[in-house]
């Protein structure tokens, strides 16, 4: 029996040594090379000497039996193997940083941080109503709200750039859970003096001469196109992007165009502006706001409480 166990240990040691060992420093080096392009700048960004950086990569290249980078003039270019490792680094390094942040917060006695990604331009007013009571309940939580992401909103959730994604258009993927928190109706917004203002609903062909104002989002992601105009093979006369809700509604109120927004938001602004909302067709467009989180984090108390507060806020 002793000799059998000894043979197993030797085999395991041999098997372990026969595979290359990827370390965190390798991922950081290749990410720095990808970002800076030269050995000097990559080494400086990591506070390493050039010789230490080169030695680390040469050792890994010896283990895997293929180059990881090659010279391209004064710059360095990743090989196919290097690109594969760097793609892994894009996923893994943010998780290292996120875990270190959580451990540091635990060591300091802090509760944690909540980084919210917004993929819903008109939802800020609603989010403010969620945040106020939530922060009263969790005063030690550090909160941040982001709208721009390096790899898209869903990519930011996968890479631990954010902890929560607020979106009306969930893209279902493994290891991501979406919880519906708010039902609403998407509606057309016009000036009270507009020729359509006396109608209860609008038909697709009635927008053919209109200027449509919208947030700077790809047209195929706008519900007015995907769920209303495109199925009827209709369009608008002109489409213009506007960054902010307030300016968009000011232009609508002045008769300079129409837009599509959540009904609850229009109801709020219509109290102080000459605007009115119409249903899209007789049936309207029903929508929901979703909160997306990573599946393995459902147990975190302050995340669950944020979702519960979102469900209660209208």
Image (spheres, rainbow, N blue to C red):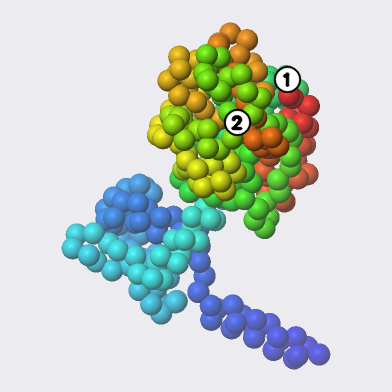
Q: Give coordinates of residue 233: x percent, y percent.
A: 51, 47
At 50% from the left edge and 74% from the top edge, which residue is drawn? 20
Please report whichever mark, 2 or 1, sits nearer to the chain's N-terminal start. 1
| Furthest-left residue in this view | 73
The N terminus lies in quadrant:
bottom right
Is 222 situated above or below 18?
Answer: above
At 78% from the left edge and 27% from the top edge, which residue is drawn? 312
Is 214 situated above or below 228?
Answer: above
Q: Give coordinates of residue 309: x percent, y percent.
A: 76, 28
Q: Give coordinates of residue 257: x percent, y percent.
A: 45, 24
Q: Can residue 240 be seen in this view?
A: yes
- As rendered, which of 136 and 289 lies closer to the eye? 289
| Furthest-top residue in this view | 272
CA distance separating discs 2 and 1:
38 Å
Q: State the residue position of label 2.
A: 202
Q: In this view, does 46 lie to the left or right of 298?
A: left
Q: In this view, does 296 lie to the left or right of 116?
A: right
Give residue 133's mark. Answer: 1
How crowded pointer 1 is (Cα within 10 Å; few <14, some 14-19, many 20+) is rated as some
Please tell me whether mark 2 or mark 1 is closer to you in this view: 2
Give residue 189's mark. Answer: none
């Amino acid at each position: 029996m002793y000799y059998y166990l000894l043979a197993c240990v030797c085999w395991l040691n041999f098997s372990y040594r026969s595979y290359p060992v990827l370390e965190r420093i390798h991922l950081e080096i290749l990410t720095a090379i990808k970002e800076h392009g030269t050995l000097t700048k990559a080494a400086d960004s990591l506070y390493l000497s050039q010789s230490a950086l080169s030695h680390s990569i040469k050792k890994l290249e010896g283990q895997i039996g293929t180059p990881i980078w090659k010279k391209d003039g004064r710059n360095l270019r990743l090989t196919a193997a290097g690109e594969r490792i760097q793609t892994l680094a894009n996923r893994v390094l943010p998780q290292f940083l996120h875990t270190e942040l959580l451990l540091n917060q635990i060591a300091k006695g802090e509760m944690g941080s909540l980084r919210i990604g917004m993929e819903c331009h008109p939802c800020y007013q609603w989010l403010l109503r969620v945040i106020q009571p939530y922060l009263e309940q969790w005063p030690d939580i550090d909160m941040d709200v982001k709208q721009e992401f390096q790899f898209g909103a869903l990519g930011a959730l996968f890479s631990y750039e954010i902890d929560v994604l607020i979106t009306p258009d969930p893209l279902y993927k493994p290891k991501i859970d979406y919880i519906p928190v708010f039902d609403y109706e998407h509606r057309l917004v016009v000036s009270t003096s507009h020729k359509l203002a006396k109608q209860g609903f609008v038909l697709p062909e009635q927008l053919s001469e209109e200027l449509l104002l919208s947030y700077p989002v790809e047209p195929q992601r706008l519900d007015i196109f995907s769920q209303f105009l495109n199925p009827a093979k209709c369009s608008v006369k002109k489409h213009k992007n506007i960054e902010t809700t307030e300016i968009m509604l000011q232009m609508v109120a002045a008769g300079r165009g129409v837009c599509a927004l959540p009904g609850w938001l229009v109801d709020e602004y219509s109290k102080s502006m000459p605007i009115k909302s119409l249903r899209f067709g007789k049936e309207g467009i029903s929508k929901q706001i979703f909160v997306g989180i990573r599946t393995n984090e459902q147990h975190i108390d302050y995340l669950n409480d944020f979702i519960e507060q979102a469900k209660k806020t209208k």
